Image (cartoon, helix red, strand yellow):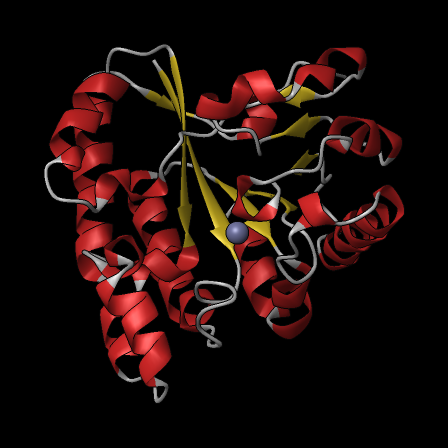
Amino acid sequence: MKIALTFDIERDIPNFLDTDFGVKIGLIKILSLLDNFQIKGTFFCTGTVVEQQPRVVHLIESKGHEIACHSLNHERLNELTFEECKEIISNNKVMIENKCKNSEVIGFRAPYLKPPKFLFRLLNDLGFKYDSSISSRKKSLYYQMKNYKIQEFHPSSYYTFFRLPLSFYFIRKWIFKKELTILYFHSWEAIDIKRLILNQKSKLNLVKNYLFRLDRWINTGDLFITRIRKFIKEALSKKAEFVTLKQLTTIK
Ligand SMILES: [Zn+2]
C-alpha cells in the first residue's frame, strides 16, 4: 500500500480570504509533522508564494520534500487560452527552479482541480513529467491524455475527507484497502480558518464562507494536524509506504 501526501501551498482559501497564515504558520506545522515520522510529501506551490515567501520554498526543499507547480496566482486555468496558461505555468516553473537549484520540477496541479482540456499538450511542451489535477471522479472527462508523455496521478476527490464529521472514520478504511492513494490538502487547513472568517469585516463574506461553506473551516487548525498524525501512525502500523509523486513517476 502506497500513500502520497500532497499539499497545495497558496494564500488562504484563494478568492475568499486575502491572508497567508497558512503559508507562514500552517506549513511549518505540516513540515514538522512529516519530520516527526521522517516521511516526505509533495508540495505544489503558487508563484505568489515563491515570490513573497522564498524562505518557505527553501525550507520545503531543505527537508527533502518534492516541490511542484500550482500556477502563479491560483488562476482558473480552464477559463484561459493555451498561450495564457503556457505563460503562467512556465513562469511558475522558472520561479521555483531559480529558487531551488537542487530540485528538478516535473509535476503540476491545476488550481481548484480544474485544468484546461489542453493541459497535457501544454505540460508536454514545457517538459513536465506528471500531472495531478484530475480527480478520480472526473477521469472520463479528460480523454486527450493518452497522446502525451505525461503521467496522471489522480488526487482524491475531496480534500475535506479528514475534517468532516464521520468521513475521517470511513475514509481510512477505504484507503487501507487500496494499492495507491493520493491525498491532497492545503497549507491553510492547518490554521484556524473559522477564526479568520469570523474576523472578516464584510457581512457578505461572513455569510458566504461561514454559513454556506462548512467545508472551508470545520476542524481546521490543530485538529486537522491531529487527524493527519493519527492517520499516518495507523498507516505505518499497517506497513504503508509514504511516497512523493516524483518517486512514483516512471516517465524518464
Ligand atoms: Zn490550490
Quarter of the C terminus within the rendering: top right
Q: Residue at x 35, y 79 (%)?
A: 204
Q: Quadrant of residue 13?
A: bottom left
Of residues 204 and 153, the one drawn nearer to the viewer in this rendering: 204
Of residues 42 and 102, the one drawn nearer to the viewer in this rendering: 42
Residue 193 visible in the snapshot: no
Q: Quadrant of residue 64?
A: top right
Instruction: Report x, y in % for residue 130.
Output: 67, 27
In this picture, residue 251 sits left or right of residue 81: left
Residue 81 visible in the snapshot: yes
Q: Quadrant of residue 162?
A: top left
Instruction: Report x, y in % for residue 66.
Output: 57, 40
In this picture, residue 103 sits left or right of residue 226: right
Q: Residue furthest bottom?
A: 201
Residue 154 drawn above or below residue 202:
above
In this picture, residue 49 sits left or right of residue 37: right
Quarter of the N terminus within the rendering: top left
Of residues 192 and 232, the one drawn nearer to the viewer in this rendering: 192
Q: How many marks?
A: 0
Residue 225 drawn above or below residue 119:
below
In this picture, residue 66 sits left or right of residue 238: right
Instruction: Report x, y in % for residue 178.
Output: 32, 12
Instruction: Report x, y in % for residue 243.
Output: 46, 26
Q: Residue at x 17, y 50 (%)?
A: 226
Q: Residue at x 17, y 55 (%)?
A: 223
